[in-house]
Amino acid sequence: MTGACLARAGCNRKAAYATLAMTLAAEAPDLDVLWSTEGPIAGFQHHRGITHTLIGLPLEGLVVLGVVWGVHRWRVRRARANGPSQQPTTINRQPPLTAAPVRWLLLYGFILIALLSHILLDWTNNYGVRPFFPFNPRWYAGSIVFIFEPVLFAVLLLALVAPLLFGLIGSEVGARRPVFRGRGWAIFALLAMVSLWGWRQVERDAAMQLASAASYGPAGSAGVEVLRVTASPYPGNPYRWHTVAETPAFYQLAAVDSFRQTVATNPELDLFYKPSPTPATLAAERSWLGQVYLDWSSWPLVAEVGPTVPNDAPSGAPTLTAVSFVDLRFLYDTSLLQGRHNPPLTGMVYVDADRRIAQMDLGGKVQH
């Protein structure tokens, strides 16, 4: 939807197929989901990987350009096959195939803009991106909007649908249909998106300041040092934030209202002591899942769950030590995600008595 709005903001007047190309390009980086066919950990390892990097975008742009070029050649051949035959006494001219001129180099530039918009949008949520990989493996996350932001969805949808509705009304009254429609709506949607980002950034900074200044710890304890703080967004409400504060001994979750300037915590549910390393957790951290998880997560909680038998294990299977991997940034409930009761992106590594990895799960799916 963002790619389509970028095209309608003026690019579609400069180069033919801009709307098609930029819409495809705005989604192209998510082709990394194909790695999920090799298992949940493989999909997790490559999610927002090379296809979401500055070094990968030019190649993706060429692929999208090739697809659009193929569509163009198909349309040219069809037009030639269906065009009127030339008569000796008359000159038949076909209408132009595209309203805007065909400019492949300019279209490639527009495709790169749409690809960059995908990385920018992914940066705004709290999962993050690595745009400079492999030269810089660091994850960057703006954490200013939820993974699905209803306000942005509604604004973009309105910008794309409104011109169609007004076009239908205009056709009913006999108004001439313009060649390019929706430029004003598209510009409005893009400006609204940037404005919302700015608003949410201000509120996130305020929430983090409140979380940094709050007092944490068990009831009756003295104030403790806060080492770092992060804030994750709720959908729709720019004043509500899920914060995580790290202290030398524990992590403290809180619900922050930046409008009322309140920090709400539950001492029984929101305090997580840092677990001491055990032979099982150390083995789990060296596993494939452990390495991938700790490479991505900036707020991991790795804990030994205890002896257990995996649900899908055959009868008579030996007892294993389960080690859980949870990212504290996602440990909260929203109207769209029950993260506290069913944390997303939770990993489980099962270690046997010899400290060997017997099984690895991610999100409830077993890696075979």
Image (spheres, grey):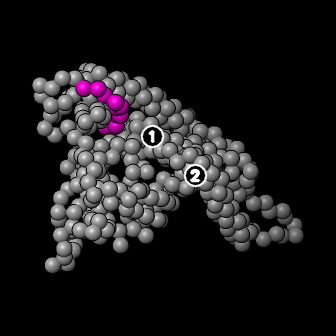
Residue occupied by mark 1: 141
Residue 238 image position (x, y, % from top left) = 34, 30
Q: Is residue 163 visible?
A: no
Residue 3 image position (x, y, % from top left) = 55, 47
Which amino acid type corresponds to the residue marked 1 in the rendered image?
A: Ala
What residue is shown at x 61% (from left), y 54% (from top)? Answer: 56
Helix, strand, or loop for circle 2?
loop
What residue is shown at x 29% (from left), y 65% (from top)? Answer: 355
Disc 2 to disc 1, C-alpha distance: 17 Å
- The quadrant in which residue 292 appears is bottom left
Helix, strand, or loop for circle 1?
loop
Could you tell whether 193 is left or right of 175 in the image? Answer: left
- The mark lying in front, picked from 2 and 1, is 2
Residue occupied by mark 2: 134
Farthest-out residue, right: 88
Picture layout, residue 69 above or below residue 82 = above
**Within-10-Å neighbours for mark 2: few <14, some 14–19, many 20+:** few
Which amino acid type corresponds to the residue marked 2 in the rendered image?
A: Pro
**Within-10-Å neighbours for mark 1: few <14, some 14–19, many 20+:** some
Q: Is residue 285 magenta?
A: no
Picture layout, residue 189 above or below residue 354 = above
Q: Quadrant of the C terminus?
A: bottom left
Residue 366 image position (x, y, % from top left) = 31, 68
Picture layout, residue 192 above or below residue 5 = above
- The quadrant in which residue 290 appears is bottom left
Residue 93 image position (x, y, % from top left) = 79, 60
Query: 233 or 50, which lies in front?
Result: 50
Could you tell whether 12 is left or right of 151 in the image? Answer: right
Q: Read off the magenta span.
A: 224-235
Could you tell whether 322 is left or right of 196 in the image? Answer: left
Q: Is residue 233 magenta?
A: yes
Q: Who comes first in sequence, dot 2 or dot 1? A: 2
